[in-house]
Amino acid sequence: MAQKVWVSMLFHNRKAQLLLVNSLTFGLEVCLAAGITYVPPLLLEVGVEEKFMTMVLGIGPVLGLVFVPLIGSASDHWRSSYGRRRPFIWVLCLGVLLSLFIIPHASRLAGLFALNAHPVEIAFLILGIGLLDFCGQVCFTPLEALLSDLFQEPDNCRQAFSMYAFMISLGGCVGYLLPAIDWAGSFLAPYLGGQEKCLFSLLTIIFLGCVLATLFVTEEAVGQVDALAGPALKDSSPKPSSPSCCSCQVSKSLLRARHVVQALRNLCALVPQLHGLCCRIPKVIRRLFVAELCSWMALMTFMLFYTDFVGEGLYQGVPRAEPGTEARRHYDEGNE
């Protein structure tokens, strides 16, 4: 009787689960939109040339191209008390939080590690940008898989991904708005620091709250509702424990190693499968793919250079000028 009540409560809490999962979608998009928009001026200010800046911003997508299939396959076979998807989501979110700390504090971190701080500052900045772009973009993959696991029925699935698309749009709006606010002149500046530190501190607070919301997602429970509600509600009495905890741990380790090897095999087998799939794609889908590819290339190019263009072209600022000078002040005004 208690199990039937529990199953009923899970069905009624679907909307709450949907909001909790998609809150992380919102947080990720806010951080990516605000962080990636603010990153090109930071790179130019520390002396990175524009041709190298695009290479730095390409690190995350290239790594994602390699690791997304591997992470997706590994999460399909993962078994833990926290579910299949959430451990991967939390690890990637940890990378995002680390990047939100590294980027605004790159200069201070460089001073702790080297006497000649400028090259080390650039290295820390590149590390933070790569982490933000890679972990943020890749985290959407297990997040989408989690939505598919939780909402498998067609109607629920459509509702879940409609909310997912809405949260991405809302997160983009908020993320692009935050860098436009003059945080250095706000009441938060004495507590959080200047423009950069204040912005990234706010992003950290927003994102941390969204990550904590995933702790209340009952991934395995909701995914097993159909099994519990069916006729196969079997004996729920506790099973006897294994006589040897050591052998049990060894078996679990071997099982996880087997899953990793299987994931690597699946990744290697993915290349010929993708080639065969591309050969069978209808012409209409190919044209759609080309249109999507060109659209995103144009959009990303515009996003990377429009803030720099406003600061240098319209406001006549100089990104490499000394802080506090007139030229640097004009450039900062153009980027706000």
Image: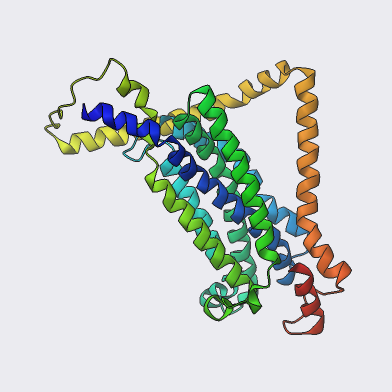
Horizontal relation, residue 162 to residue 146: left or right? right
Q: Where is residue 312 in the image (x, y as percent from the top left)?
A: 84, 69
Horizontal relation, residue 280 to residue 240: left or right? right
Q: Position of residue 96 (x, y in %)?
A: 53, 55
Q: Which residue is drawn at 56% across and 76% down?
A: 188
Q: In which quarter of the image is the C terminus?
A: bottom right
Horizontal relation, residue 45 to residue 133: left or right? right
Picture quarter containing residue 314? bottom right
Picture quarter containing residue 166? top right
Q: Quadrant of the N terminus?
A: top left
Q: Is residue 30 depicted above or below 256 in this figure?
A: below
Q: Residue at x 79, y 19 (%)?
A: 283
Does the image show residue 314? yes
Q: How many labels does the image show?
A: 0
Horizontal relation, residue 236 to residue 36: left or right? left
Does the image show residue 63? no
| Colour theme | rainbow
Picture quarter containing residue 234? top left
Is 35 in front, or is 278?
Answer: 35
Is 13 in front, or is 289?
Answer: 13
Q: Which residue is drawn at 52% across and 43% down?
A: 22
In this view, the residue farthest toward the bottom is: 325
Q: Which residue is drawn at 55% across and 52% down?
A: 27
Q: Where is residue 7 in the image (x, y as percent from the top left)?
A: 32, 29
Q: Is residue 90 depicted above or below 127 in this figure?
A: above
Q: Is residue 128 depicted above or below 259 in this figure?
A: below
Q: Position of residue 111 (x, y in %)?
A: 55, 77
